[in-house]
Image: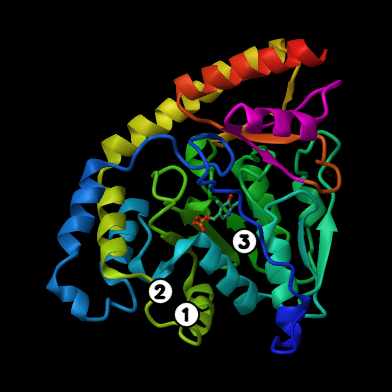
Amino acid sequence: MSKFWSKIAASQKPYVPGEQPKDKKYIKLNTNENPYPPSPEVIEAIKAAADENLKLYPDPNGDALRQTLADYTGLKKDWVFVGNGSDEILAFAFMAFFDPGRPLFLPDVTYSFYAVYINLFQLDYQLVPLKEDFSLDPSDYFNSIGGVIFPNPNAPTGHCIDLEMVEAVLAHNPDRIVIVDEAYIDFGGKSAIPLINQYPNLLVIQTLSKSRSLAGLRVGFAFGQDELMEGLNRIKNSFNSYTLDRPSMAGAIAAINHEAYFQLTRGKVIRTRERIVPIMTEMGWQVIPSKANFIFISHPVLRAEDIFALLRQEGILVRYFRLPRIDNHLRVSIGTDEEMDRLLDTLRKITAAVL
Ligand SMILES: *Cc1c(COP(=O)(O)O)cnc(C)c1O
């Protein structure tokens, strides 16, 4: 508490990202980063953009990147919004589309940044409990009071709903916005982007951070019809005209254009996940079926918090959340095959010592 802080700063409980430790080299399976490097073409494009033009402001509308995304998705450029990571776009969206007094609906177990924005913008909300197995029932979101947000696949569970289910939520909220956060959609789910033509209440948010190996570049996108784009732009242009810098936009364009590299690396992550899950199950872990680049696991006997600490000692970082319903679970990002084999070996060692 400080006498210099505003009431909002004083009451805020900021988001705590997964640690990025510097004390030693860890196998990092704690922040859902991609284990593979970005495409070499991305790095070339960023280097090429580091030229004398940096003296000039970047394009405030990001037109070149938006056009690339329009061509890629088949949407028109006017229905594409770009921002400094999808977290920034989510912040704009919470401010643009939700109001105090009209609770927005969100899952009780979900991306914990949503609660931070709710607090920051002093919004009202209604937590919608996931089912016992952590699956999401679309009908629980019908006729929302103030709109809906959920990630698909959900985080940190990895559970994904199919497109018909997303559409059911849209169809039963014709006068409310439905935000689908597709940070992990490229690892096995079906994007809701094709529904945008039909549903003016749909906002789809995506990011380069996970499936394009560019968490360090901070580029996210949103897709939706005119009114939603205008809402986002009203907030963005009341906050910062130049959210994306020149090298980031150049790198992002190269990342979208290098489709073969994207297919190769996301395919590897998916194959590693599919290889690992049956092994973990055989070792006694309960694994929620995942369509993301992480798995959410628990054990009938071992305590998640203890395993988290023991893995950390062994140089492997995973994510533990001390939160209701999930305080005996671990979220484990999918690394390379070698990293996952190290994890399995270490878990076997730890388990043998404890059980
Ligand atoms: C990682 C993540 C984001 C944030 O992505 P950035 O583009 O890196 O800001 C948004 N939503 C969910 C559900 C995520 O897991």
Looking at the image, do the residues carrying marks 1 and 3 touch, with CB atoms under 8 Å apart?
no
Q: Earlier in the sequence, mark 2 or mark 3?
A: 3
Instruction: Name the side, left or right, on which 330 lies relative to 125.
Output: left
Can you identify the residue that label 2 sits on?
Answer: 243
Segment tinted magenta in the rendering: 296-321
Vertical arrangement, residue 145 with respect to residue 135, above or below: below
Amino acid of disc 3: Ile
Can you identify the residue that label 3 sits on?
Answer: 179
Per the model, the C-alpha gap separating discs 1 and 3 is 16 Å
Q: Position of residue 30 (x, y in %)?
A: 59, 40
Per the model, the C-alpha gap separating discs 1 and 2 is 11 Å
Amino acid of disc 1: Asn
- Kindly state the secondary structure of the residue where label 1 is placed: helix
Neighbor class of circle 2 (other Cα within 10 Å; few <14, some 14-19, many 20+) is many
Name the residue rendered at 49%, 55% in the picture. Answer: 206
Of residues 99 and 337, the one nearer the viewer is 337
**Which of labels 2 and 3 is toward the front?**
2
Instruction: Name the side, left or right, on which 237 lies relative to 275.
Output: left
- Kindly state the secondary structure of the residue where label 3 is placed: strand
Q: Is residue 313 found inside the magenta-colored segment of the image?
A: yes
